[in-house]
Image (tube, rainbow, N blue to C red):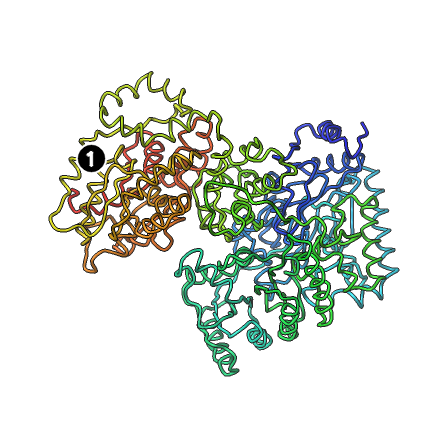
């Protein structure tokens, strides 16, 4: 059946007929997150397809060719140039086509599908002492297909160069749906028994060879001039002297010529020894002046960044999140590698002395420990996100984030580039691969207004002329995409532009593969995502965002760190499901679509947005781990409040949201209530309340139990602090309050217990913000007027008092109360007597840190306290436990809750090996009890572990 470009239903039916099992999704709930990548652009696709095999890709391309609908291939969606958005069908390779097919240790090659994440490949090859050389900062979520698409490089490109230098063969599907293999000697059909495919492929190769023969001098003079010349097509690989290497020629074509389904890549040996130099400078130009000298020492990496990135990291994650940098306002990281550690260390010392003699540095040091090196590398790797939203709240944008010059020209280029910024009254945050002459910069453009877009266009045009004047390239790593393709005519002759067009037309005569990129480019200021939007009235204040809620959700710039499982806590639902819509980025993009009001037209009432937010555990980890500080838990609370305003809510919002009230009532008759809940009546009540029956409802404690435990813990003398007895501790584990009181008194912080108050958290997490405000206002009124520290044993309640209360109430009294709040860990770290010694502790502990504590109380981690107190082995189950307050108790979320637990916590519990389990969060402890499945495993609160009265 032939379809038209408007007949989407016909297209999906045609695809289903060719590939019945292929998943294809339409509608704003599915396509909204794919309208964006990490660039300035928004292009809403008609559909998103999730191929599992190369035959699925063939089916999509054939159906789209019949219908005249474009196709855009996509990996991790981390492109900063707009390479991975398109208005037709987007092919998401990351969801299913992410297998490592083979590793040949002897040949040092690996065969991988296009959706394999780089870190997954590196983890597998490390077992053989091998690595894939190119390592972009997005290595934890970028895919090999995406790296091939834009010829990615990375931090160690001084040593390893570009992706094109590591590709042995590409398995592709042509625009007309033919499977082929491109390698170092040309092109061949993937199925030699298919005579028609063989004929088409042979004709294609002949046309390509003729194109090269007609342009030999042009290709030799204009292409391959500097190491990072990524802009345009790399036709120099097709020259006779280069053996007509079609595999490498297709690298960097950004999906405009063929769709890559798999690749065979070359691996390199893992370095046996390495060290890192951290060098400080007054500014980035001074740093660039030293680069040619540094390159003489054969480093594996020379990376640069300016002070704005470091300041933002410290402001967002705490002052101690960046340590070990020498004095300066700009820094270089210089990595040296070799076969012998002593020899590498000696080279590093010699290099440091040589640079000191040059007199440009403000300071320098060798970074000794691997942990400190990892910490410093993370600052550089998060550069794109950190630079997007700076300390002063200002926003910056890509667009000219990827130019490169020869390293010896870098200082002169940077000097002139900064003058150009000043002439347009713009500011840029500079970082990048200085050793390769590649500069990343995010600039404070104003793409939301017509005047701002005009300034942006003028600047980009002049910047293109400037980098060409310095012998450089528009793109040194990210590709041209929608951001720079229009400017290629500044860099290349008309004949070269025509040769690029002929190359694409040979592969894609109808122009259906990623149109608007490189050839026949869209205007660089077309399809910009940002525009002027009306202010949105909300209950939360969003004080850190100039445009309120609209500015808050705009924080997401698409770098995709939430799609990573390489460190940090976010995003548990994405890690459990692998779905873009279940990532922090996917949800933020849907909220952006809601505010925009085009694809999502029903605002706060949107079912698509509600569905996107549904699997958010409200763990708050994104507020800490996301480089731009997206706080999806707060956005979800606001959305639920607005969505259900004046309407009946889900049953669990009443049963779990009002738990502090019902648990307080249950405390007056705890024994009969618990007996009732353990039987059939309890299961019936759970079902009626939207609560899963697969979990045991925790037993309520009596009011008398709390009074008894606090009386037993009382110590003589004046109280130095307030012990806030939260609703969870009061209702379910009063013994923790007693233990906390004893521990604090023992540590020199005697406390006065404050019972009967609530932080309002359960009403916040279920979006009942009006009730939450009333609860919080009463709590603030009771706690204000006292300057003593407030210590909270339950981390989630401490986080609510610290963050949600001031942001929801917006009063000075709320701010005063929040400034006094400490977790037990924080109190013992900051307030305890210096000579305090805890009772004997176990040697090995399995620790589950509460996500809210991780996100809100930076630098005050239970793991650090335990190590300081003498626990030698602290195994932290990094990540969410999966219960997450009300989330894991809701019937519809039980399976996801358990899938999240399977990521880190459950495997450790299954191999506990006698370690003591510690979990301060009530949710965490409840999940551990559930996962124990009858085994003798109980999670201790930190207070119980440190209790001087414990047996």
Disc 1 packing (10 Å; few <14; some 14–19; many ≥20): many
**Which of 606/436 is in front?**
606
Q: What residue do we see at 29% from left, 36% from top? A: 727
Count of labels shown?
1
Please say if 693 is above or below 304: above
Question: In the picture, which quadrant includes the C terminus?
Answer: top left
Q: Nearer the viewer, residue 278 or 653?
A: 653
Q: Residue at x 50, y 83 (%)?
A: 357
Residue 620 in the image: above or below residue 614: below
Q: Quadrant of residue 798?
A: top left
Q: Residue pushed farthest left? A: 716
Q: Residue at (63%, 44%) from the top-left corner?
A: 113
In the image, 541: left or right of 702?
right
Quadrant location of the N terminus?
A: top right
Label 1 SS = helix
* Residue 600 horizontal side relative to residue 702, left or right: right
User: Closest to the observer: 717 or 9?
Assistant: 717
Quadrant of res 867: bottom left
Side of 891 where 446 appears, left or right: right
Q: Is residue 337 visible?
A: no
Residue 403 percent coordinates (x, y) = 66, 64
x and y percentages locating residue 480 in the rendered image: 71, 56
**Residue identified by numbered label 1:** 706
Residue 440 location (% of width, % of height): 61, 62
Q: Residue furthest top?
A: 680
Q: Position of residue 479 (x, y in %)?
A: 69, 56
**Residue 462 seen by the camera:** yes
């Amino acid at each position: 059946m032939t379809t038209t470009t408007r007949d989407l239903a016909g297209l999906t039916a045609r695809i289903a007929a060719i590939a019945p099992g292929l998943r294809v999704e339409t509608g704003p709930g599915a396509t909204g997150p794919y309208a964006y990548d990490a660039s300035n652009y928004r292009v809403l696709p008609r559909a998103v397809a999730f191929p599992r095999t190369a035959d699925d890709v063939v089916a999509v391309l054939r159906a789209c060719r019949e219908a005249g609908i474009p196709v855009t291939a996509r990996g991790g969606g981390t492109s900063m140039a707009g390479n991975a958005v398109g208005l037709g069908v987007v092919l998401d390779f990351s969801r299913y086509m992410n297998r490592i097919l083979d590793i040949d240790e002897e040949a040092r090659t690996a065969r991988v599908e296009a959706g394999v994440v780089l870190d997954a490949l590196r983890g597998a090859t490390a077992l053989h002492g091998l690595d894939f050389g190119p390592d972009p900062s997005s290595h934890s979520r970028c895919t090999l297909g995406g790296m091939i698409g834009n010829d990615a490089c990375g931090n160690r490109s001084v040593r390893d160069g570009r992706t094109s230098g590591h590709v042995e063969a590409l398995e592709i599907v042509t625009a007309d749906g033919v499977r082929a293999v491109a390698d170092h000697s040309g092109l061949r059909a993937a199925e030699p028994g298919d005579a028609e495919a063989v004929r088409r492929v042979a004709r294609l190769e002949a046309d390509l060879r003729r194109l090269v023969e007609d342009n030999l001098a042009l290709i030799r003079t204009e292409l391959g001039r500097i190491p990072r010349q990524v802009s345009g097509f790399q036709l120099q690989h097709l020259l006779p002297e280069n053996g007509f290497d079609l595999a490498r020629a297709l690298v960097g074509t950004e999906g405009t010529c063929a769709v890559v389904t798999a690749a065979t890549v070359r691996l390199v040996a893992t370095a046996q020894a390495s060290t890192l130099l951290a060098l400080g400078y007054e500014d980035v130009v001074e740093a660039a002046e030293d680069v040619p000298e540094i390159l003489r020492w054969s480093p594996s990496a020379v990376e640069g960044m300016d002070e704005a990135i470091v300041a933002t990291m410290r402001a967002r994650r705490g002052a101690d999140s960046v340590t070990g940098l020498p004095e300066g306002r700009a820094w270089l990281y210089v990595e040296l590698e070799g076969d012998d550690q002593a020899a590498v260390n000696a080279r590093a010392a010699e290099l440091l002395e040589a640079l000191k003699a040059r007199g440009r540095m403000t300071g320098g040091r060798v970074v000794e420990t691997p942990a400190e090196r990892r910490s410093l590398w993370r600052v550089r790797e998060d550069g794109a996100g950190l630079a997007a939203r700076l300390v002063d709240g200002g926003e910056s944008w890509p667009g000219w984030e990827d130019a490169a010059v020869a390293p010896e020209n870098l200082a002169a280029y940077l000097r002139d580039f900064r003058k150009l910024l000043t002439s347009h009254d713009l500011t840029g945050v500079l970082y990048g691969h200085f050793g390769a002459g590649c500069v990343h910069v995010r600039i404070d453009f104003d793409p939301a207004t017509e005047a701002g877009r005009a300034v942006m266009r003028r600047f980009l045009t002049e910047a293109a002329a400037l980098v060409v004047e310095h012998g450089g390239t528009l793109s040194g790593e990210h590709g041209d995409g929608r951001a720079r393709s229009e400017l290629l005519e500044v860099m290349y002759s008309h004949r070269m532009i025509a040769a690029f067009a002929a190359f694409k037309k040979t592969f894609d005569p109808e122009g259906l593969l990623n149109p608007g990129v490189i050839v026949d480019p869209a205007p660089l200021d077309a399809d910009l995502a940002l525009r002027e939007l009306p202010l949105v009235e909300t209950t939360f204040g969003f004080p850190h965002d100039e445009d309120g809620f609209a500015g808050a959700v705009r924080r997401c710039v698409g770098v995709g760190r939430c799609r990573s499982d390489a460190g940090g806590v976010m995003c548990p639902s994405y890690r459990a499901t692998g779905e873009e819509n279940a990532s922090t980025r996917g949800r933020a993009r849907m909220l952006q679509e809601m505010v925009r009001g085009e694809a999502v037209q029903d605002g706060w009432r949107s079912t698509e947005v509600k569905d996107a937010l549904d699997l958010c555990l409200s763990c708050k980890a994104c507020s800490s781990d996301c480089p731009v500080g997206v706080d999806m838990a707060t956005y979800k609370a606001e959305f639920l409040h607005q969505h259900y305003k004046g309407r009946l809510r889900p049953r669990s919002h009443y049963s779990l949201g009002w738990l502090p009230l019902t648990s307080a009532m249950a405390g007056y008759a705890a024994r009969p209530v618990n007996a009732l809940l353990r039987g059939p009546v309890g299961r019936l009540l759970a079902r009626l309340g939207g609560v899963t029956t697969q979990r045991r409802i925790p037993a309520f404690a009596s009011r008398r139990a709390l009074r008894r435990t606090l009386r037993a813990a009382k110590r003589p003398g004046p109280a130095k602090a307030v012990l806030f007895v939260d609703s969870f501790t009061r209702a379910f584990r009063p013994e923790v309050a007693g233990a906390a009181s004893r521990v604090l008194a023992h540590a020199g912080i005697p406390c006065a217990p404050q019972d009967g108050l609530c932080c309002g958290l359960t009403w916040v997490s279920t979006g009942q913000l009006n009730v939450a405000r009333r609860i919080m206002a009463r709590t603030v009124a009771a706690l204000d007027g006292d300057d003593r520290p407030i210590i909270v044993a339950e981390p989630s309640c401490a986080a609510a008092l610290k963050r949600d209360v001031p942001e929801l109430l917006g009063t000075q009294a709320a701010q005063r109360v929040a400034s006094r709040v400490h977790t037990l860990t924080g109190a013992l770290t900051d307030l305890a007597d210096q000579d305090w010694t805890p009772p004997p502790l176990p040697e090995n502990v399995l620790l589950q840190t509460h996500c809210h504590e991780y996100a809100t109380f930076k630098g005050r981690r239970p793991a650090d306290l335990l190590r300081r107190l003498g626990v030698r082995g602290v195994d932290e189950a990094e990540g969410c436990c999966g219960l997450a307050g009300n989330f894991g108790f809701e019937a519809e979320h039980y399976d996801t809750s358990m899938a999240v637990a399977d990521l880190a916590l459950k495997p450790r519990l299954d191999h506990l090996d006698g370690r003591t389990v510690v979990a301060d969060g009530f949710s965490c402890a409840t999940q551990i009890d559930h996962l124990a499945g009858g085994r003798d495993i109980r999670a201790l609160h930190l207070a119980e572990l440190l209790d001087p009265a414990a047996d």
